[in-house]
Amino acid sequence: REARRAQVVEYFEDRATTLTLLGGLHGTEEALALLAAWEAEHPLPSDGPFRPDSEEYAQLLAHIDELFAPFVATQEFHDIFLVDLDHGHVMYSSAKESDLGANRSAGPRRATGLATAWRDARESRELTLTDLAWYEPSREDSLFLALPAADDAGIMRAIVVVQVGADELNSIM
C-alpha cells in the first residue's frame, strides 16, 4: 500500500514539474504573445464564448500546435489548454474539443473541473489540482492541473492547464 501511495505521489510531482516547464517554455511565451495580439484586435465577450472558427484563428492555432508539438508528443496528457486570464476563455486546446472558445467565468461551463482549475490558479497564483470528475467535452473523468503563465516581465498573462484523463490515472493504479 505504501509503494502504491509513493507511486501516486511521484506521478503528480512529475506532472507538476512538467506543467511548470511548459509554463516557462519559449513556445508558451510566444503562444501567449500571439493570442494577446489576436485578442487586442478581436475583443472577447466577458459573459459568453467566442467563436474560434475563423480562418485567421485556425492559422493561429496551427502555429501554436507547431510550438507545442514536441511537448504534446512526449506527455501523457489528454489536453493542454491556454486559458484567458480575465474571463476564462479557452484560447487554445491541443485536443480541439468543444471547450475551445468556451467561457469559464459565465455560462454552462463555469462549474467544470477546467473552470475550477482556472479560478483556483488565477486566485492563488500557484499550481492547483482539481478532484477527479466527469468532464463532458472529453466524455471521461478527468482532473486538471493549472499554473499561471507570465511573460518576460513577470506579468501573469494566462493560465496553463493540463487535463489528465482517467486512463492516464488508471495506468498508475
Image: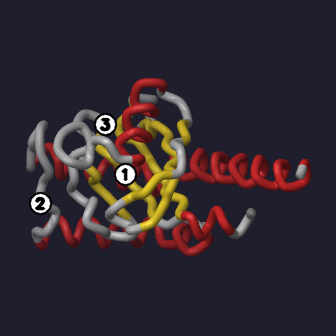
Which residue is tagged 3? 85
Q: CA distance from mark 1 to mark 3?
A: 9 Å
* Residue at image point 13% right, 69% down: 53
Left or right, 44 with reference to 7: left
Residue type, mark 3 in image: Leu
Q: Residues within 10 Å of mark 2 (few under 14, many from 20)?
A: few
SS of the residue under disc 3: loop
Q: Residues within 10 Å of mark 3 (few under 14, many from 20)?
A: some
Q: Which comes sooner in the sequence, label 3 or label 2?
A: 2
Q: Which mark is residue 82?
A: 1
Which residue is tagged 2? 51
Percent coordinates x, y for residue 145 in the rendering: 53, 46
SS of the residue under disc 2: loop
Q: Are marks 1 and 3 in contact (CB under 8 Å)?
A: no
Percent coordinates x, y for residue 112 in the rendering: 35, 47
SS of the residue under disc 1: strand
* Residue at image point 90% right, 48% down: 2
Percent coordinates x, y for residue 159 in the rendering: 40, 42
Q: CA distance from mark 3 to mark 2?
A: 18 Å
Which image quarter is the C terminus in? bottom right
